[in-house]
Amino acid sequence: MAKIAIIDDDQDIIDAVTITLTAKGYQVVSAKNVNDGMKLVENEKPDLILLDVMMEEPDDGFYLATKLRKAGAQTPIFLLTSVSKATGLEFAGSQTLQVNEFLEKPLSSEILLQKINQYLGNV
């Protein structure tokens, strides 16, 4: 089954998403910051990345997504954000960021699994 990386500074999010994904047979690896997240992606080679937008810095997710793409990563990246609830701004897929999805926190398990299946199928 596919390996999914969760990069988020909120342990509750990591735990909840891990429970959901492992129950569906996915292997889950996680990191809590940009530096550990970059190492995780390089070492673990996940099939999909769930990446929080705001961690130690408000733009860490954007920074890491850009850094991964510049390094040649083709892995699907989903940015997880609660920014639109706080600011009223909405995000959509962007050629500039080259991420595949923006998902609003709190995450719906059904939507998350549907989107993952859309990108990974039966990997």
Image (tube, rainbow, N blue to C red):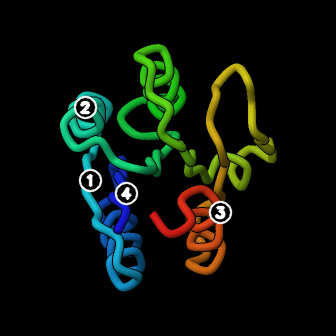
First of labels 1, 3 by sequence position: 1
Image point (61%, 53%), residue name: 82
**Element under disc 3:** helix
Name the N-terminal-most of marks 2 and 1. Answer: 1
Quadrant of the rendered image containing residue 89: top right
| Residue 111 coordinates in the image, percent (x, y) | 66, 72
| Element marked by disc 2 | helix
Could you tell me which quadrant the C terminus lies in? bottom left
Q: CA distance from mark 2 to mark 3?
A: 24 Å
Disc 4 on helix, strand or loop?
A: strand
At 39% across and 65% down in the image, what residue appears? 13
The amino acid beneath tag 4 is Ile
Q: Amino acid at mark 2?
A: Glu
**Closer-to-camera residue (41/81):** 41
Q: Which residue is mark 2?
A: 42
Assess disc 1: are there few (<14), some (14-19) or many (≥20) residues with their C-alpha within 10 Å of its C-alpha: many
Q: Residue at x 40, y 74 (%)?
A: 21
Few, some or many C-alpha atoms within 10 Å of disc 3 (few <14, some 14-19, many ≥20)? few
Instruction: Work out how far the residue at label 1 is from the one at label 3, CA to CA, in angstroms.
Output: 21 Å
- Outermost residue, top direction? 70
Q: Which residue is mark 3?
A: 118
| Lateral position of residue 78 relative to residue 8, left or right | right
Q: How many marks?
A: 4
Question: Which of label 1 and label 3 is nearer to you?
Answer: 3
Left/right placement of residue 106 relative to residue 52 reads: right
Which of the two discs, 4 and 3, sits closer to the camera?
3
Could you tell me how far apart the alpha carbons at marks 4 and 2 are, in whole angstroms?
13 Å
Residue 4's disc is: 4
Up-down: is 98 above or below 80?
above
